[in-house]
Amino acid sequence: MDEKTLMERLGTFKVEVPSWGFSDSGTRFHVFHQKGAARNVWERIEDASQVNKYTGAVSSVAIHIPWDKVDDWKQLSDFAKGHGLKIGSVNPNLFQDEDYRLGSLTNLVPKIRQKAIDHVLECIDIMSKVDSKILSLWLPDGTDYPGQGDFVERQRLLEDSLMKIYNALDDDMTLLIEYKFFEPAFYHMDTGDWGSAYALAKVLGDKAKVIIDLGHHAQGTNIEYIVSILSYRHKLGGFHFNSRKYADDDLTVGSMNPYELFLIFVELNKFFVLSSDSKPALVIDQSAALKPKVEAMIQSVEALQIAYLKSLLVDIDALKKAQLIGDIVLAEEIVKDAFLTDVRPILQRVREEKGLAPNALEAFRKSGYVEEVASKRG
Amino acid sequence: MDEKTLMERLGTFKVEVPSWGFSDSGTRFHVFHQKGAARNVWERIEDASQVNKYTGAVSSVAIHIPWDKVDDWKQLSDFAKGHGLKIGSVNPNLFQDEDYRLGSLTNLVPKIRQKAIDHVLECIDIMSKVDSKILSLWLPDGTDYPGQGDFVERQRLLEDSLMKIYNALDDDMTLLIEYKFFEPAFYHMDTGDWGSAYALAKVLGDKAKVIIDLGHHAQGTNIEYIVSILSYRHKLGGFHFNSRKYADDDLTVGSMNPYELFLIFVELNKFFVLSSDSKPALVIDQSAALKPKVEAMIQSVEALQIAYLKSLLVDIDALKKAQLIGDIVLAEEIVKDAFLTDVRPILQRVREEKGLAPNALEAFRKSGYVEEVASKRG
Amino acid sequence: MDEKTLMERLGTFKVEVPSWGFSDSGTRFHVFHQKGAARNVWERIEDASQVNKYTGAVSSVAIHIPWDKVDDWKQLSDFAKGHGLKIGSVNPNLFQDEDYRLGSLTNLVPKIRQKAIDHVLECIDIMSKVDSKILSLWLPDGTDYPGQGDFVERQRLLEDSLMKIYNALDDDMTLLIEYKFFEPAFYHMDTGDWGSAYALAKVLGDKAKVIIDLGHHAQGTNIEYIVSILSYRHKLGGFHFNSRKYADDDLTVGSMNPYELFLIFVELNKFFVLSSDSKPALVIDQSAALKPKVEAMIQSVEALQIAYLKSLLVDIDALKKAQLIGDIVLAEEIVKDAFLTDVRPILQRVREEKGLAPNALEAFRKSGYVEEVASKRG
Amino acid sequence: MDEKTLMERLGTFKVEVPSWGFSDSGTRFHVFHQKGAARNVWERIEDASQVNKYTGAVSSVAIHIPWDKVDDWKQLSDFAKGHGLKIGSVNPNLFQDEDYRLGSLTNLVPKIRQKAIDHVLECIDIMSKVDSKILSLWLPDGTDYPGQGDFVERQRLLEDSLMKIYNALDDDMTLLIEYKFFEPAFYHMDTGDWGSAYALAKVLGDKAKVIIDLGHHAQGTNIEYIVSILSYRHKLGGFHFNSRKYADDDLTVGSMNPYELFLIFVELNKFFVLSSDSKPALVIDQSAALKPKVEAMIQSVEALQIAYLKSLLVDIDALKKAQLIGDIVLAEEIVKDAFLTDVRPILQRVREEKGLAPNALEAFRKSGYVEEVASKRG
């Protein structure tokens, strides 16, 4: 791919950042507080706009209900626009209500199940108000001990609940079903792997797809393979980008295995180029417990840009030929060659063309924003 | 469940044993040879019949083509019958031909792909001759390095190949698709998880189902959950029973985590009782590198009988009630109570009713069979 | 082992319960509140005494500083005695102070390091006051990202800090060093495995040993092997008992793989019988997020009693003989025979001899304690 | 680091290649044969010299006894020298003799144990004859089932056997003890982790160290941490370089997670620069089942050169400063900056200075060597 095309592609490459990535977070052991961490959705959008200001690569902000709930949704939408951003995917919260102790959409008690459904329906309502097209549903339901729940019965209830949600979607809305290997439940999760999310999405219909969170798999899982299968099966709905070494560590993107991230983009790239399906949502989902929030987000956006750029460098035609003649070494070298290339000069040129500083982190640090909000937000 | 019913259930509980479990096997480092290990299918059936002689719980012998290929299939079928057994599932071999170096059903070279398809069609032909109803397909295809293969293209070819195979099945035949996390391929497997096997089975039709090998998952995978989802989705086709602590270790059944085996049966038991789907195939698939083969198989059959018996002891009605009131501790105690019960007295009584010795291993050891075949087979 | 000896052994078998196991706990997502959950150390000791009241198998209560800090330590000690318990191991807290964001005993800032050391020294002081002999140190220190810390420098600082702590121990006190695979740090832990804890304990001296938390290992780790090596190397200091399927799930003991727990006891049992080293501390460390706290602890104590009893049933002499003649099947059957035996009748008899109800959970439930504290504690 | 120093460092960077990496190998399912694969040690050294011819970075060839056994060791040594190589580490084989079915150095039968010891002593004798200074011992011993062996007794025997071996070493010889998580044993390995290998090396003395095989760990293990601890404890003896995604896959170096390889070198680099210990042995240990052998080895050498070069680019002083002020983001960026740099131009310049082709793989392919040996070796 010639440099001009590369620069064009990168120039239009945008990702969504999560509002919750700008507020204090931590582990079950402790939440370390950061001076100036955003305290509400308005401040979270301000922070998100900073990420965009220095990277030029943020399209929208994912919101989480009720954390980001406001009285006037139009006001929020306008506020975001005023900061150069849209409201992106809407994320229901099914894990913080005492009623959901034994499940939300799978709860055996009809009233609680309905409460959970109603909460998601409320989110769909909010989607209309903020012009969001994506309902991003992570189901924390599961059990901690053998016997606690009946897997089949819970699956039946889940399907039933999801159908009610699905039926409330407008035609141009998409329901993304997220799966997770474990946590917060420690014996079984009701959508514990892509297979179960896929099966649900098939039953629901074309508006339901699967979203892949990079941290939600068993050790060793080949995620790029899952990308390819979901893509082939027309059910690839999006990504929650982050990084992990152990469990769902929610580290900044690409920080543990950048080669894996690159290979995911190589797979995804085929989709970008070839598929007639709607493009998958590209959303960062991280929780920078110790790193400064905005900086961590800038790092992640940049890691995605670099992985994307490198993936575009793979000589697809040469690769196909190498595969055809069964030349494993040559095929691998073609892929590695793209990965080994330092694409940061291209990234910097794109930034310069957009009038941005070549080094986003440095520019942000020099801006004094952190000090400003630290004093302003108290 | 009263003891009489328990005994009846156990009395009719049968599993299939694999012919390959009676011959020498090992690791990539070494194959340790055992005196008297079976050298051909006739001897393998003789050995299998010994397992049945002492457990009374073997229905049939799975065969592997070409390892078990004979000139006269009727003769083999009769030989098995003469030993009180049927020929069970037929297993194609797609991993030992030099042509399959870069794939069999997914190979980019049409001629090799066709060769692989033809081999499976030959297996279907053999099924007719030995009156087998189950084609059990484990696909070893995959890649070792990024770039080596195009996941999507390989999936497309696989689906195409499988469709040709599927269309050759008689109406009363079932195709079981086996998935595996890794090995022999070390970067990706073309059917690497239950989700991809399920998606293929859905496309193919009702005669295609998924078979679960207990050793083919990532560490930590909740297998009983997969059992329940496949069961709920009407795609649970069968099991390859064995045990593992690390990878696909192919150890004797129940030897690493008997509680997991029990929980799998608890889940499966609902299926046995409730579903109108055809019963899943229950097949042992192990490779006792160091243990004497027949003894290892007797251990595995017994481990399955014990797990099955215990699973029947779970008080389903009480469990449902505990689940309904959200009593996690009580629900777990009901499950644990069944597991903690020593069911071996029931097993011994069933054996005695069948005229068998109460201690199968001991009786086999005393029979002198091992010494006999060691001298006979040289 | 004859039943009388079994009963005697079980009768004197005692474990320590953690004070923190009786208060609300949860995941990073949510802490579900339980009515009547203990709010302070006095209530935690009351709850612990209930566990002892129905199991007769609790020796002591582990305390956590500062959570369990009181003004008058003698009063606390007397209060425990009044409830039939001792104060057991003392556990410093090095993970909840904002100063420890980048490490406690390994912090590059001398002042913070000293603060952490001082906190542990304070714990040693408390040990004297409550007559505790065990300092149980879990170090949460580690890093989240490559580059964040210098592994070697941090190890040097850790060794230095520990030496200062070690030197403050009385001669009859033991320092237990706990290791953990990951969490709360997500890239590296300063004591990430038993090897590093062992190396530190060797440098420190005879009063330093290693404590094994069953949930702190990589998937697949053979924990009983670690027990045996630490035992052989005279550095086995104790256990934190709990259960896990995925990460450090802190589930009730034996709930995921009771066979593994039993095998750990088989290994430990040799130590109990043969070694002249001081006995390892047997401490439960669990966090029952959803289960009622006291009930969960009773389950865990009972799971330990059952595992211990079964381990005593292993016919050691027969096992040794089977091992000597290389009879793998027989050796395994001897081990399995012990595990398959239902030892609950023995447990019940021991309880009856002690004047306890045979079913501890049932008796506790009927006692009305839960309802009482729910109303009393508000 | 300035480019001149970089080039000097790379110019003297040498690794050892394994003789066994040039012959046919495979999985337990099948060994795929390659035309022209080396059939004996002479051909293996010829192949190894090809790797050196095109990379200029091979110091020596590890040999495996008895696979590489010859009548005249001086002849072999001279043959290697004639090909520009030395004989490197000597590797005993304790896994292919039927006698070792239940263990070699840990076998309960004194005669078999002595046979294993004698085999290793023979290897030490060979070391003298070929002027090798490194005995590289991988112990395949372990058990497949609970009960099969007594962990403590086996450890005692192992220590005893190793002491006899250790005592036979010349003063300038080093014994490297290799550990492995699992395989070929599937329940426990007698040296299953670095901790047990370390403990043995401590008991034996200064000539005993630990060798790290990158593929011998549980999923998620932080290998660079182990490097640092062994380095700090003066027991880092060497590496077996390869790559894995799942188990001990023995893939070409850096093919699965090049960032991890780089981080290992960052850690190792401190050792290179600072430690007064003898340098660790850098040995490739891979088994390219499907890739052409010489090409696969060239890939691995190049991957090591690239990782080493990148590790040298880390600005250690700046990193230390960032760590001191607790700037996680800056510290990580310093590390990432080195990794993201494309060092291949430097590699090519070093090659050109040595009179080598800049693209080693291409040059080797054009040389016609593969075709030549394919016809010559039949």
Image: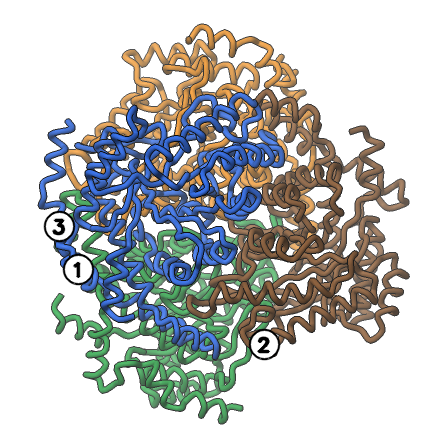
Chain colours: A blue, B brown, C orange, D green
> Could you tell me how many numbered marks the image carries?
3
Q: Nearer the viewer, residue A171 or D311?
A: A171
For discs 3 and 2, the disc positioned in front in the rendered view: 2
**Disc 1 and disc 3 on one polypeptide chain:** yes
Cα distance in 3D space between marks 3 and 2: 55 Å
* Residue B110 - label: 2
Cα distance in 3D space between marks 2 and 1: 46 Å
Task: Name the spot of residue A112 as percent of width and height, x first.
Answer: 51, 23
In the visual, does B9 lie left or right of B106? right
Q: Amino acid at mark 1?
A: Gln
Classify residue D352 by image quadrant: bottom left
- Is residue D159 visible in the rendered image? The answer is no
In the visual, does A101 lie left or right of D340? right
Q: Are marks 1 and 3 in contact (CB under 8 Å)?
A: no
Which residue appears at 62% of the width and 73% of the height? B96
User: Which quarter of the figure is the C terminus of chain C placed in?
Assistant: top left
Residue at mark 2: chain: B
Which residue appears at 62% of the width and 12% of the height? C355
User: Which quarter of the figure is the N terminus of chain C placed in?
Assistant: top right
Classify residue C77 by image quadrant: top left
Secondary structure beneath dot 3 equals helix
Residue for badge 1: A348
Q: Amino acid at mark 2?
A: Pro
Task: Name the spot of residue B350 as percent of width and height, x first.
Answer: 84, 40
Residue at mark 3: chain: A
* Badge 3: residue crowd in 10 Å (few <14, some 14–19, many ≥20): few
Residue for badge 3: A362
Secondary structure beneath dot 1 equals helix
**Disc 3 and disc 2 on one polypeptide chain:** no
